[in-house]
Amino acid sequence: MDAVNKAFRGGFFISAGVLLAVTKTPDIFTVAAVVACSIIAAISLTRYAGCSAIGGALLIAASLALQTALSYRCMDCIKADLLILAGVIYMSIIETSERKNVLRGMAAVITALFMVNALIHYPVFIGKPMAAAASKVSQYISVSYDGQRASLDTSVKPVLLFSSSCGACRSTIGRLAETDPEGKRWIPVQVGGDAGEGRELLNSAGYRGIRYQSETEWDEAVPALVITREGKTKFFYGQEEILKAVRGDNS
């Protein structure tokens, strides 16, 4: 039984680290997060296992704070945070020392913070994984290209908002570029990450159309498809739903 507990204790944190390593661009934040997950996983296997719950909670808080500070919402990050949160909750439940109530209270607080953030910024957590009402972006999206500004009409062609550091964006763009490399039915607009990396991402995916940089603030999850039909602007999240919307399978 102790072997099973150890597997669970470290498994959540290792899984979060692997997820980030596989899906994210290896920038300083990603590397730091992967290293932190590895350290926390190692601590969870020692007699100081309770400290891993504290470390996990701090890592989640840092992730949410960083996303807020950078006005950047990343589904890969939130998935990793969810795995870490599962580890924090598990560690607090199996804790038997005098500090078990403290750890459980901490787990409850960080869970509440996570859920508030998810409810505000990730529509999948409020039962609207496919579409959400536009908040800061309307039918027309201000963009720039080669130093010139323009306005894209999402009723003419759907706009895909993406970040160069988002693994889910890379996968979605790859799927879209496979069927429409010229961008005849969709337009990629970068809202986060390095511009050069965004260009490289599109090139590596085989996209040969025009790439725009957003001039409009966007602090929600990516990738997100913005589309206007019959005067109503909707957002679509998730690779399969985005693909369906571009094909016209979604109404």
Image: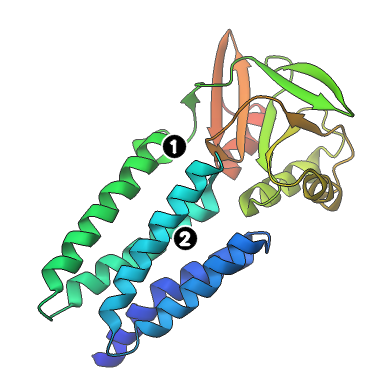
Q: Residue at x 82, y 34 (%)?
A: 211
| Residue under label 2 | 80
Label 2 Cα crowd, 10 Å radius (few <14 / some 14-19 / many 20+) = many
Determine the residue located farthest toward the top in the rendered image.
231
Q: Residue 130, image x and y in percent?
A: 49, 33
Any part of residue 148 in sight: yes
Q: Amino acid at mark 1?
A: His
Q: Residue at x 49, y 21 (%)?
A: 135
Any part of residue 123 in sight: no
Task: Classify the position of the N terminus by image quarter.
Answer: bottom left
Q: Is residue 128 above or below residue 216?
A: below
Q: Nearer the viewer, residue 93 or 178?
A: 93
| Residue under label 1 | 121
Q: Secondary structure at mark 1?
A: helix
Task: Classify the position of the C terminus by image quarter.
Answer: top right
- The quarter of the displayed image where residue 231 is located: top right
Q: Is residue 91 above or below residue 108?
A: below
Q: Amino acid at mark 2?
A: Ala
